[in-house]
Image (cartoon, helix red, strand yellow):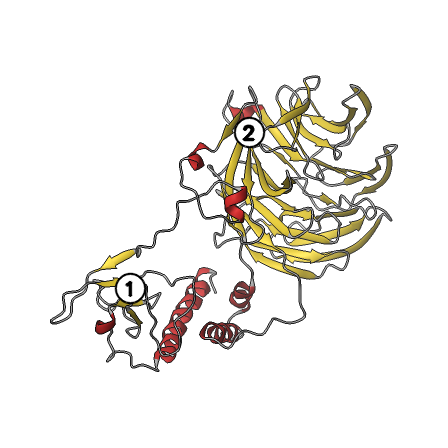
């Protein structure tokens, strides 16, 4: 889980920070700089302890630590073809190896050490550094993309199998044999990673919109997540939580997405016999008549939680770790900072930034003081483990639109989105907090100021005595709701079809 920092302006922070990587169990962070490298412990949120620092090798662009041991592997721009293995507590060099071309990435677990060049992969026995295997039939891999399972009992290796498609070659680093090839994506691969046990493999293509998870060693697709709709997004990193319940993905945008890997079942649970369940069935039934790209999109799961970054366009890596017995999202960036967020494992939502650590300079920390100024939320998981990310929700309607009919002077209050508490009951009317009755006007927003404007939420709040009974007779509400939502769904399908160029 290592990244080379993007080039920045001369003398700037980005120029000083060359690379950064989390160790295998996410308990340590290593960074490479123009002066050398540093290792930090991730055992505390409030304090970032430097475990070791060295200036013996300048201009480091790869640094990898083996779990929490004293073994660290370093590669420098001064000798890009040479790998140096150190015991940093003793201050001694264990060994060094030279290769035929520049080293692009290094992966290691307690049994194997992987050295990736552009057109070959070298597999060493980490105990004596003996070369066990050289994989030569590797398509050109200019970024050094590869992954090694941290589970030394299998030591699975994954690397791109094609220059033009997202094919993944799964290799057994223990038996030194190819296991299978996985047709993961149509486009070229951008990121791959194993979970802690080596039983799952996640991947993303250069397009960056879809993330897939496959079983290992079978290579069967287990999950498919949609990161977003943007067509040109560069995925920087993928990382499973240690318990394999979550998967996080960072990119060159300002959002880190976290997906939840729900337990797989043989069939979908039966939807309750409600209006929402009925509409869900209609929606899924319609997807069978759409092009494959659109129906696949409708079946993809969305992010369970997100982390908002204060920047975009900078190289970064993310990981999920348990620090002080609570789940955290960690993001290291080429701007020279480590960002720590709280993650709510029950409800997800937006993660709260609670600490920012400087990786360079004085090493002082910066707390997210903005959160200190916000009022407290009701006691919940998010309230007890994180500072609130937003002020308490207001009970005042989002927008009030005046509307007067003949002989009427009272305002009509309209909600711009459905409430989360539920759906309208059968009959098409519901009671609001002021005793008003909810009515649908058959697909047109009342008093919107735009003749014939479509009603996306289809909820118009009226005083009880002003509810337009003539527009929607009691007992026909479900029919009108179904009709209007069906038109809305059709419009969305049309938009998605046009978006992907079908």
Question: Where is 33 relative to 181, above or below?
Answer: above
Q: Residue furthest left?
A: 407
Image quadrant where residue 475 sits: bottom left
Residue beneath the point at 38% across and 51% down = 393
Residue beneath the point at 70% across and 52% down = 201
- In this orientation, does residue 351 appear? no
Give the left or right position of residue 312, taking residue 238 as reference.
left
Quadrant assignment for the N terminus: top right
The residue at which mark 2 appears reads as: 357
Circles 1 and 2, Cβ within 8 Å, touching? The answer is no
- In this orientation, does residue 124 appear? yes
Circle 2 residues within 10 Å: few <14, some 14–19, many ≥20: many
Question: Where is 200 relative to 267, above or below?
Answer: above
Give the left or right position of residue 252, taking residue 3 as reference.
left
Measured as percent of width and height from the top left, residue 224 is found at 60, 59
Mark 1 or mark 2: name the one nearer the start of the chain.
2
Q: Residue furthest top?
A: 56
The residue at which mark 1 appears reads as: 434
Measured as percent of width and height from the top left, residue 308 is found at 48, 43
Measured as percent of width and height from the top left, residue 401 is found at 23, 60
Please name whichever residue, 2 or 41, is drawn nearer the observer in this view of the structure.
41
Question: Where is 192 relative to 480, above or below?
Answer: above
Please name whichever residue, 9 or 432, is drawn nearer the observer in this view of the structure.
432
Measured as percent of width and height from the top left, residue 117 is found at 73, 37
Question: Where is 297 relative to 376, above or below?
Answer: below
Which secondary structure lies at badge 1?
A: loop
């Amino acid at each position: 889980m290592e990244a080379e920092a993007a080039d920045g302006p001369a003398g700037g922070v980005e120029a000083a920070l060359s690379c950064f990587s989390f160790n295998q169990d996410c308990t340590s962070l290593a960074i490479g700089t123009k002066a050398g490298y540093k290792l930090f412990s991730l055992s505390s949120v409030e304090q970032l302890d430097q475990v070791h620092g060295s200036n013996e090798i300048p201009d480091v662009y790869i640094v990898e630590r083996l779990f929490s041991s004293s073994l660290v592997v370093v590669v420098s721009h001064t000798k890009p073809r040479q790998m140096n293995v150190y015991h940093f507590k003793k201050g001694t060099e264990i060994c060094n190896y030279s290769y035929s071309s520049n080293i692009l990435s290094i992966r290691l677990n307690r049994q194997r050490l992987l050295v990736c060049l552009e057109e070959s992969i070298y597999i060493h026995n980490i105990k004596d550094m003996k070369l066990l295997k050289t994989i030569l039939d590797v398509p050109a891999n200019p970024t050094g993309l590869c992954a090694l399972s941290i589970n030394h009992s299998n030591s699975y290796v994954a690397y791109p199998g094609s220059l033009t498609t997202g094919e993944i070659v799964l290799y057994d680093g223990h038996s030194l044999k190819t296991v299978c090839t996985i047709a993961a994506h149509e486009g070229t691969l951008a990121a791959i990673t194993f979970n802690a046990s080596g039983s799952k493999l996640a991947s993303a293509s250069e397009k960056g919109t879809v993330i897939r998870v496959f079983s290992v060693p079978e290579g069967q697709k287990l999950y498919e997540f949609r990161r977003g709709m943007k067509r040109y997004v560069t995925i920087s990193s993928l990382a499973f939580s240690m318990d394999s319940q979550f998967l996080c993905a960072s990119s060159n945008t300002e959002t880190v997405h976290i997906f939840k890997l729900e337990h797989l079942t043989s069939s979908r649970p039966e939807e309750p016999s409600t209006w929402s369940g009925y509409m869900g069935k209609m929606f899924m039934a319609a997807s069978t008549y759409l092009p494959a790209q659109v129906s696949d999109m409708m079946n993809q799961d969305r992010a369970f939680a997100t982390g908002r970054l204060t920047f975009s366009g900078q190289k970064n890596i993310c990981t999920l770790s348990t620090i002080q017995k609570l789940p955290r999202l960690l993001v290291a960036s080429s701007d020279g900072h480590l960002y720590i967020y709280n993650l709510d494992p029950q409800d997800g939502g937006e993660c709260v930034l609670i600490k920012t650590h400087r990786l360079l300079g004085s090493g002082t920390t910066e707390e997210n003081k903005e959160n200190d100024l916000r009022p407290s939320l009701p006691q919940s998981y998010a309230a007890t483990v994180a500072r609130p990310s937003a002020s308490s929700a207001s009970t005042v309607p989002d927008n009030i639109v005046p509307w007067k009919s003949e002989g009427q002077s009272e305002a009509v209050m309209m909600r711009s989105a459905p409430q989360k508490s539920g759906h309208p009951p059968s009959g098409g009317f519901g009671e609001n907090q002021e005793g008003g009755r909810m009515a649908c006007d058959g697909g047109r927003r009342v008093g919107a100021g735009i003749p014939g404007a479509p009603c996306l939420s289809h909820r118009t709040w009226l005083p009880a005595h002003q509810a337009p009974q003539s527009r929607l007779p009691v007992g026909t509400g479900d029919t009108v709701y179904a009709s209007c939502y069906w038109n809305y769904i059709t419009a969305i399908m049309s938009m998605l079809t046009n978006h992907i160029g079908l």
